[in-house]
């Protein structure tokens, strides 16, 4: 693998791989390499590029986009981070801290869309 496009280490992928969906029992071609697709998706978001500008190293951008859409639709992108956070929290690797900010930002008098009655004459 080209180190320029490496996104996940082998240790990280070892935790993520079991959370990926299987293609067995589904119609059509079997899934391409889950790792390559996941790294393509992550690379695209990290670089802030459009799907069409995804480097050819990850395969056709349409394939990566379809896999991303599938992961989003079937809940994989929701389940995977939740499972990783649960595992890390159980191992004591996460220290939860909550910060509450009570800052108030006032809007300019013309910053609303509501009519303002100033008490002037009504025509």
Image (spheres, grey):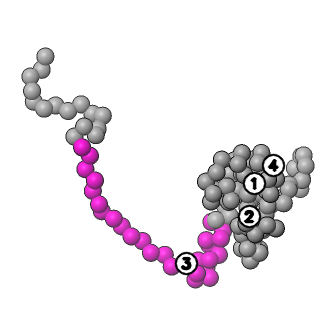
Q: Please give the residue where the numbered disc 1 appears in the rendered image.
A: 55
Q: Please give the residue where the numbered disc 3 appears in the rendered image.
A: 94
- Quick one: label 1 or label 3, which is nearer the N terminus? 1
Instruction: Please identify the residue farthest to the bottom as the structure is shown.
Output: 92
Q: Secondary structure at mark 4?
A: loop
Contact, CB < 8 Å: mark 3 with mark 2?
Answer: no
80 shown above or below 74: below
The reply to whether residue 93 is visible in this rendering is yes
Quarter holding residue 32? bottom right
Q: Please give the residue where the numbered disc 4 appears in the rendered image.
A: 60
Position in image of residue 43 (x %, y %): 68, 59
- Quick one: label 2 or label 1, which is nearer the N terminus? 2
Asked if residue 79 lies in the magenta stretch, the reply is: no
Q: Secondary structure at mark 1?
A: loop
Rendered image: mark on residue 5? 2
Cα separation, mark 4 vs mark 1, equals: 9 Å
Cα separation, mark 1 vs mark 3, equals: 34 Å
Cα separation, mark 2 vs mark 4, equals: 15 Å
The local crowd at label 4, few if under 14, some if 14 to 19, many if 20 or more residues have their Cα within 10 Å, is few
Contact, CB < 8 Å: mark 4 with mark 1?
Answer: no
Position in image of residue 73 (x %, y %): 69, 48
The reply to whether residue 70 is visible in this rendering is no
Q: Residue at x 29, y 60 (%)?
A: 103
The local crowd at label 3, few if under 14, some if 14 to 19, many if 20 or more residues have their Cα within 10 Å, is few
Q: Closer to the observer: label 1 or label 3?
A: 1
Position in image of residue 57 (x %, y %): 80, 57
The local crowd at label 1, few if under 14, some if 14 to 19, many if 20 or more residues have their Cα within 10 Å, is some
- Quick one: label 4 or label 1, which is nearer the N terminus? 1
Read off the magenta span. Answer: 82-108
- Quick one: label 3 or label 4, which is nearer the N terminus? 4
Contact, CB < 8 Å: mark 2 with mark 1?
Answer: yes
């Amino acid at each position: 693998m080209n180190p320029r496009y490496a996104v996940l280490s082998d240790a990280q992928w070892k935790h993520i791989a079991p959370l990926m969906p299987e293609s067995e029992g589904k119609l059509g071609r079997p899934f391409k390499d889950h790792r390559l697709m996941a790294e393509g998706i992550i690379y695209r978001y990290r670089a802030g590029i459009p799907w069409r500008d995804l480097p050819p190293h990850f395969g056709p951008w349409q394939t990566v986009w379809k896999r991303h859409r599938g992961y989003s639709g079937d809940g994989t992108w929701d389940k995977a981070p939740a499972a990783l956070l649960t595992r890390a929290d159980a191992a004591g690797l996460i220290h939860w801290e909550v910060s509450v900010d009570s800052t108030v930002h006032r809007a300019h008098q013309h910053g609303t869309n509501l009519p303002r009655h100033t008490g002037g004459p009504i025509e």
